[in-house]
Amino acid sequence: MNAGINGLANLEFIPWIWVFLLFTAIHDLEEWNINAFERSHFTDVPEYATSRSARGVIAFVCLVGLIWSSAAAVSGDPAAAWILLPAVFFMVMNAFQHVYWSVLSQSFMPGIFSAVFLIIPSGAYMILRAVGQGKVPAWYAAVWAVMFTAVWIHTARAGGKMTLFIHGVYPIGHWISERIPGEK
């Protein structure tokens, strides 16, 4: 295992983009059955929030992640860090939401394992590395950290109520799910 960790640590920033995208995809796939959790533990879940539309959200996030990561990777250093860090902060914030919701509900939330063991450590590493290697200034990371904190405070205040952001992405997932063949 040490060899794998050392191998990842020796990667340049651009290859780390693809590692983080892989971890994001794993995290999203771990959320395959998240709608059942949301229906059991959140209030104000819209009718169009179904397992199928949740999977549409997963497909949307993976596609956006691929496009965002590709844009960052082709831009080269140091622009890649400027482009990618907002997405990394978003995923780390989402990972902390999973931790919060698991504690709040006192139950397993889909996505918690990859959030804790993949997204939080690799996201923190990429942020620290980008700042430490001078790819982005500390103030840039601080701005995203403040935004992350504001969203997290919103999540904590919402408690067991579905947040506005999650409420907002379900129409996208519903739209996607309506265009995918199969049982509706």
Image (cartoon, grey):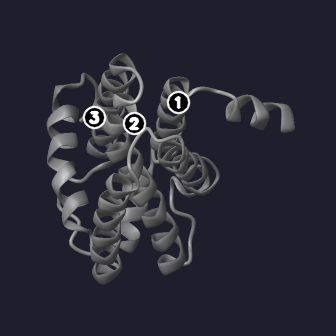
Which residue is label 2 attached to? 81
The single residue placed furthest to the top in the displayed view is 74
Residue in front for this viewpoint, 80 or 71: 80
Look at label 3 and name its amino acid: Phe
Using the numbered discs, state the Cα–Cα distance from disc 3 to disc 2 in whole angstroms: 22 Å
The residue positioned 69% from the left and 32% from the top of the image is 8
The residue positioned 51% from the left and 53% from the top of the image is 111
Which residue is label 3 attached to? 60
Q: Is residue 1 visible?
A: no
Which residue is label 1 attached to? 13
Q: Are marks 2 and 1 in contact (CB under 8 Å)?
A: yes
Task: Examine the image and state in which quarter residue 66 appears.
Answer: top left
Q: Is residue 127 visible?
A: yes
Q: Left or right: where does residue 108 sit relative to residue 170?
A: right
Q: Are marks 3 and 2 in contact (CB under 8 Å)?
A: no
**Quadrant, the C terminus:** top left
Q: Residue 171's spot in the image, x, y percent?
A: 14, 47
Q: Left or right: where does residue 142 sit relative to residue 131?
A: left
The residue positioned 39% from the left and 30% from the top of the image is 78
Q: Residues within 10 Å of mark 2 (few under 14, many from 20)?
A: many
Q: Secondary structure at mark 3?
A: helix
Residue in front for this viewpoint, 50 or 131: 131
Q: Is residue 77 above or below residue 26?
A: above
